Amino acid sequence: MNRVEQIKRTFLKELEEVDTLQGLEDLRVRAFGKKGELTLLMKELGQKTPEERRTWGAELNALKDVLTTALEARKEILEEGCLKDQLASESLDVTLPPHARPRGKIHPLSHVLDQAIHIFGQMGFVVAEGPDIEEDFYNFTALNIPREHPARQEQDTFYLPSSNGQPLVLRTHTSPVQIRTMQKNPPPIRIIAPGRAYRSDYDATHAPMFHQIEGLVVDKHTHMGHLKGCLEEFCRLFFENPSLKLRFRPGYFPFTEPSAEVDISWKGESWLEILGCGMVHPNVLRNCDIDPTTYQGFAFGMGLDRIAMLKYGIEDLRLFFDSDLRWLNHYGFAPEARE
Ligand code: PHE
């Protein structure tokens, strides 16, 4: 048997026995490395006669091809085996019960929202929703804020490119949900609409994205007394203070008439504004095909972030949106405390 045939047999036999990727690499080096058997044979070629070179060369090249193909085939098998072993040893039974209780906390805003929905829910309000990207019509026009109205300038609106000829904005308040609700449902109406609102504003008490809770009641005999009673009841329950004082100051909103701004007495020292409200303007009812001679309504819009800051002594609104784990752990609520 010549040397070539011998090398081939030994190599192929060892190849079959090798069972690790490292072993395979060692074998490769023994054949093809700098001092590998095949490499040395190739070097010897130079000293042969041209005739020998031709036959030897062909044989050596054939050997090289056989060994390379065999190496690659073995490598594939070993790699696949490796992956299977790894998958088997790292398997995870997702049906096992967890070792530890979840450690996440409820964000103070989510907690406050739950409380508000709970309190208003007991008064018979249901939750309504509308889109954050809103048509100019719902955010302004239908709310009695026509195109040239100064209130449009006051709101630091984020305008978006129009779609299908409809000017679009990021809603500057949750009041457009009033319109969407009245267009869809006939009175009596009793909804709250919690959600995000957007204004180009940024300091300790203003963020470009913030939260409001809108309220809307429309019925045949709704009057300002209902509005006052409803808000008083809510604030006393929410702030857990049955003698909390509210102050209704005359205000102005294009979509309510009369309008008021509401302050709560804070630590017996000062008044803090928490919401705007009023009787739904007859134009707004008309815009929704509701006859203002038969129906009246009241509406309010409350800053959710604001009442959360007051209740839990949070000084800077921007902290709500920082996602700082230490802060969340401190100000967040245990899941089981969720109402
Ligand atoms: N939309 C008003 C605001 O964002 C609040 C409001 C709502 C006032 C409903 C009156 C009635 O300031």
Image: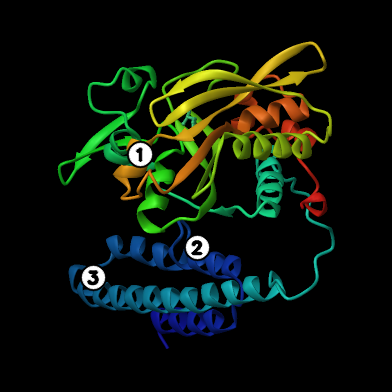
Residue at mark 3 to residue at mark 1: CA–CA distance: 101 Å
Residue at mark 2 to residue at mark 1: CA–CA distance: 85 Å
Q: Amino acid at mark 1?
A: Val
Mark 2 and mark 1 lie on one chain; the one further toward the N terminus is 2
Task: Locate residue 175 relative to residue 115 in the image: left or right.
Answer: left
Vertical position of residue 222 compared to residue 160: above or below: below
Residue 49 location, quadrant:
bottom left
Residue 208 in sight from this viewpoint: no
Q: Amino acid at mark 2?
A: Val
Q: Which residue is mark 3?
A: 53
Question: Residue 273 versus residue 280: which sits nearer the camera?
Answer: 280
Number of other residues with Cα within 10 Å of mark 2, as a class: few under 14, some 14 to 19, many 20 or more: some
Residue 102, image x, y percentages: 78, 55
The residue mark sitting in front, 3 or 1, is 1
Vertical position of residue 90 compared to residue 15: above or below: above
Residue 115 in sight from this viewpoint: yes
Q: Which residue is mark 1?
A: 284
Mark 3 and mark 1 lie on one chain; the one further toward the N terminus is 3
Task: Locate residue 35 relative to residue 112 in the image: left or right.
Answer: left
Element class at badge 1: helix
Mark 3 and mark 2 lie on one chain; the one further toward the N terminus is 2
**Colour basis:** rainbow
Residue positioned 47% across, 63% down in the render: 36
Residue 31, image x, y percentages: 46, 68
Q: Which residue is mark 2?
A: 29
The residue mark sitting in front, 2 or 1, is 1
